[in-house]
Image (cartoon, rainbow, N blue to C red):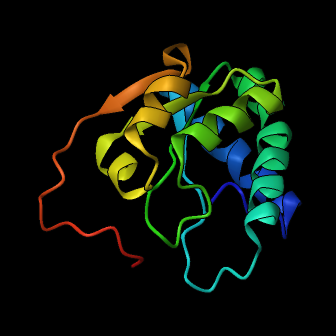
Amino acid sequence: MFNLLDDQVTLLKNAEALLSQAQAIHSKALVLCPHCSAGDSRSEEQKKTDTLAALKLLAPLFTKYGVQGYVEPLGFGISSLRSSLLTQSLIRDSGAPYKIVLDTFHHYLSDVAQPEFDAQIQIDVVMAKRYRQAQPETQRTPL
């Protein structure tokens, strides 16, 4: 839930604790997962704005601890960051060297059209890939 900015002091404190632990165990990366809640009343624009602000806010901590940040869009309808293409755009706009975790299951749920994805994804931004088969009965409905 890195992209909730209600309490930036706590967000920074928690991120610093996680990054310190990651550094201590020689972890090369830490995954940032977005807020997922049916009760999230923010507009889509506010979710984008908050996500970009959070990426910028946390970037100096990732640099300080020498840990790579991976952002994982979650395709669930209740996710505040569903699309890998939007994630790519926000990473670019943040100016920070984050990478994307691309999970094919979440990509399927995100409703990004495959031709659009193929035309726009920049593979150099994708660091980790997880391939899972969505079952034919898996429906693209909100949780």
Which residue of the protein is positioned furthest toward the left in this rendering?
Answer: 136
* Relative to 92, residue 3 above or below: below
Q: How many numbered marks appear?
A: 0
For the N terminus, the image quarter is bottom right
99 w.r.t. 34: above or below:
above
Q: Position of residue 59 (x, y in %)?
A: 78, 32
Asked if one can make out residue 24 in the rendered structure from this viewpoint, the answer is no
Residue at 73% in and 42% down: 16
Q: Position of residue 13 (x, y in %)?
A: 78, 52
Give the residue furthest to the bottom: 39
Q: Is residue 27 left or right of residue 42?
A: left
Q: Nearer the viewer, residue 46 or 62?
A: 46
Quadrant of the frame with the C terminus: bottom left
Quarter location, residue 65:
top right
* Residue 38 sits above or below residue 104 on the image: below
Residue depicted at 43% across the width and 55% down the height:
111
Q: Is residue 80 visible?
A: yes
Quadrant of residue 115 within the rendered picture: top left
Nearest the camera: 94 or 16? 94
State the image quarter where residue 86 is shown.
top right
Q: Is residue 89 left or right of residue 94?
A: left
The residue positioned 51% from the left and 48% from the top of the image is 73
Q: Residue at x 71, y 57 (%)?
A: 3
Looking at the picture, how far across and down is residue 103, in whole percent? 35, 41
Q: Residue furthest top?
A: 124
**Measured from the top left, where is residue 98 in percent x and y?**
65, 27
